[in-house]
Every structure is written in C-alpha cells, then in structure tokens.
Amino acid sequence: MRIQTGQLIALGYGKYVRSDEVVAVEPITEGRGPGRRSFVWVRGVPDAMVASRAEGSIVDDLVTPADEAARMKAQRSVLRKMVKVLESASPGVRRVLDEETDVDLADLISEATQVLG
C-alpha cells in the first residue's frame, strides 16, 4: 500500500488532514464511542488527533487514489439508491422479480447493505 500524496483526509466533524502528513492511525480501544473511533498522528502535531471515523476507513482514504475514491463513492451512492428502491417494492413486485431473475431479492438487499456498511 502506498500513501497517496496531497489528498485531504476527513477525520470527521469537520477535521481534515493532508494524506502525506499522517504518520500513524490507531483504533481507540478504551473510551471508544460516538466521535471517538481512532487516534491519528500527524507530522508536526505533538498529540494524536481524535477521529470520529474508524481506522480502516481512514487508511482506505490514505491509500486510495482520488479518482478511484470518487468512482467508489459514486458506486456506493447508486447501490444505496438501488437498495432503497428494492426495499420499497411491494411483495408482489418482489415475487415477480425473484421469479423472473432467479435472484432472491432479500438476500441481494442484505448483501448490498453489508457492502455499504
């Protein structure tokens, strides 16, 4: 994995750091809760910053090229809309779709929801 340079990385609650200035990311294990998910050490800042995002999400942002991140964000948005539409379909429409596509929509919705986190 290679850190992408010059990208702004969101830590949550309006805090951003430059990707190439991040030195370390660590999950908070004690006192973790809303607004307290990870510690992020930044070059030149003596104390760790508290991030409201999970360490895995921050690291993903650090190593994902900006164009790929934008594409992934668009894909997640489309997937969220598809889940919303499928969840709102009437039982009759779901049954027809299940029969016509040979896909269990409940399983598909569940899988998509897991992918979205």
Image: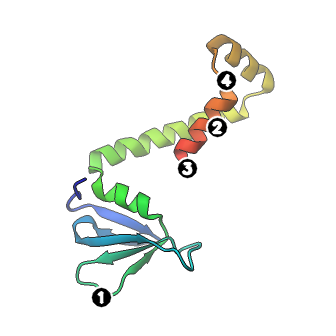
Which comes sooner in the sequence, label 2 or label 3?
2
Horizontal and vertical percent for residue 67?
A: 28, 45
Kind of residue at disc 1: Pro
- Residue 5, placed above or below residue 99: below
Which comes sooner in the sequence, label 1 or label 2?
1
Disc 3 designates what residue? Answer: 117
Horizontal and vertical percent for residue 87?
A: 70, 35
Residue at disc 2, secondary structure: helix
Horizontal and vertical percent for residue 58?
A: 39, 62
Q: Residues within 10 Å of mark 1 (few under 14, many from 20)?
A: few
Real-space Cα separation, disc 3 to disc 1, in angstroms: 33 Å
Q: Residues within 10 Å of mark 4 (few under 14, many from 20)?
A: few
Disc 2 designates what residue? Answer: 110
Real-space Cα separation, disc 1 to disc 2, in angstroms: 43 Å
Disc 4 designates what residue? Answer: 104
Residue closer to the observer: 15 or 20: 20
Badge 4 vs badge 2, beta-carbon distance below 8 Å: no
Q: Residue at x 69, y 31 (%)?
A: 106
Which comes sooner in the sequence, label 4 or label 3?
4
